[in-house]
Amino acid sequence: MTARIALAAALAVPAPAAPAASYGILLLAHGGDPAWNAQAEAVRAAANASAPTELALGMADPASLQAAADRLRARGAARIVAVPLFVHSRSEVLDQTRYALGLSDRPSDVLRAAVERLQAMPAPPHASHMHLYSSRRVHLKVPVTMTSALDDDPFVSSVLLDRARALSRRPAAETVILVAHGPVDDAAEPAWEDALARHAQFVSREGGFRAADFAVLRDDAAAPVRAAAVARLRGLVAAASRGGRVLVVPVLIARGGIEEKIPRDLAGLDFAWSGRALLPHAGFEAWVLRRAAGAAEPSSSAGLTPSPSN
């Protein structure tokens, strides 16, 4: 066999197929303005350097979820681990996402009612990324599971401490107040408060602050509920300011959402504020990878559930 014929024969043999990825990461994010979305995309890109990662933006938008899941399947993912880049797992959006991914049997009535109420407003507060509530589900032939969100993860506490220190002048005379979006559902509020209390304890202890407290805005709840939440927040800031300087730190994923509402809600009070959210901050891609790896361990495989096929 001549060298030319041997080369032609070698080229005719199909190359071995690339091994399928053991799992792909479906990064879930609420979404906001283009700057907000870019921050989530930066986390996806960083995590993608270590594991196939695709981003689904929106309030459990089935089209976005389907497109991201399809991209992971095309990249060879044999199963999918969904990682919510959300402040807390007790979220009506994540309840709806679990339904869309086939991980629960019922859609979120709380989200449906909230979307209907918000869309009936003259200027819906999240019109740029709020899709119509849908009972559609994702069609996928590979197993899928979902991890918990940020919740009370110590990594988040450390980011909040960094944000407080950036505002601080004399910690021993300062009170830090953490402010989160909060849920629509009253029943979910205690879980949010428990996680925020843990963050506040860490910030106060590790930062040497006079004290630390927290509040939720209940921003998508009915107007009377939100008004009561704002009144509580104002009361915390007013009381703390009588004993020293107050540092207000948002517990939000990224700028480009509701962060500008907080200083408006606190108008007339004395407090320090930068508006810096959790992103950008080094280490979020590592958090995503840790969450996904923990869910993908063999001991976690029993929780993997096939997505709906119809």
Image: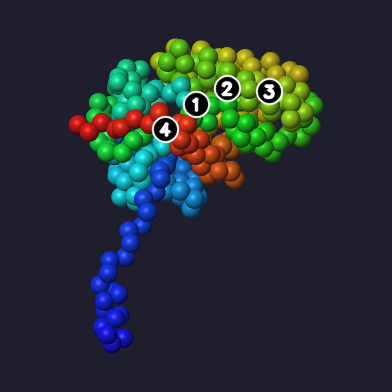
Left or right: residue 51 versus residue 133 is: right
Q: Amino acid at mark 2?
A: Ala
Label 4, on which residue? 301
- In this orientation, which residue lies closer to the viewer: 67 or 21? 21
Q: CA distance from mark 3 to mark 2?
A: 10 Å
Residue furthest to the bottom: 2
The N terminus, quarter of image: bottom left
Q: Earlier in the sequence, mark 1 or mark 2?
A: 1
- In this orientation, which residue lies closer to the viewer: 241 or 64? 64
Badge 1 density bin: few <14, some 14–19, many ≥20, Cα 10 Å: many
Residue 91 coordinates in the image, percent (x, y)? 43, 23
Please say if the residues under marks 4 and 1 sit with CB atoms less than 8 Å apart: no
Q: Amino acid at mark 3?
A: Gln
Q: Which mark is residue 14?
A: none
Left or right: residue 268 versus residue 43 is: right
Q: Is residue 139 shown above or below 53? A: above
Residue furthest to the left: 310
Q: Is residue 83 shown above or below 243? A: below
Please say if the residues under marks 3 and 2 sit with CB atoms less than 8 Å apart: no
Label 3, on which residue? 201
Q: CA distance from mark 4 to mark 3?
A: 34 Å
Mark 4 or mark 2, whichever is nearer to me: 4
Please say if the residues under marks 1 and 2 sit with CB atoms less than 8 Å apart: yes
Label 2, on which residue? 195
Determine the residue positioned at 50% across, 16% down: 189
**Residue 238 seen anywhere in this rendered image of the structure:** yes
Determine the residue positioned at 79% across, 32% down: 170
Q: Which mark is residue 88?
A: 1
Determine the residue positioned at 64% across, 17% down: 236
Badge 3 density bin: few <14, some 14–19, many ≥20, Cα 10 Å: some
Q: Earlier in the sequence, mark 3 or mark 1?
A: 1
Q: Amino acid at mark 4?
A: Ser
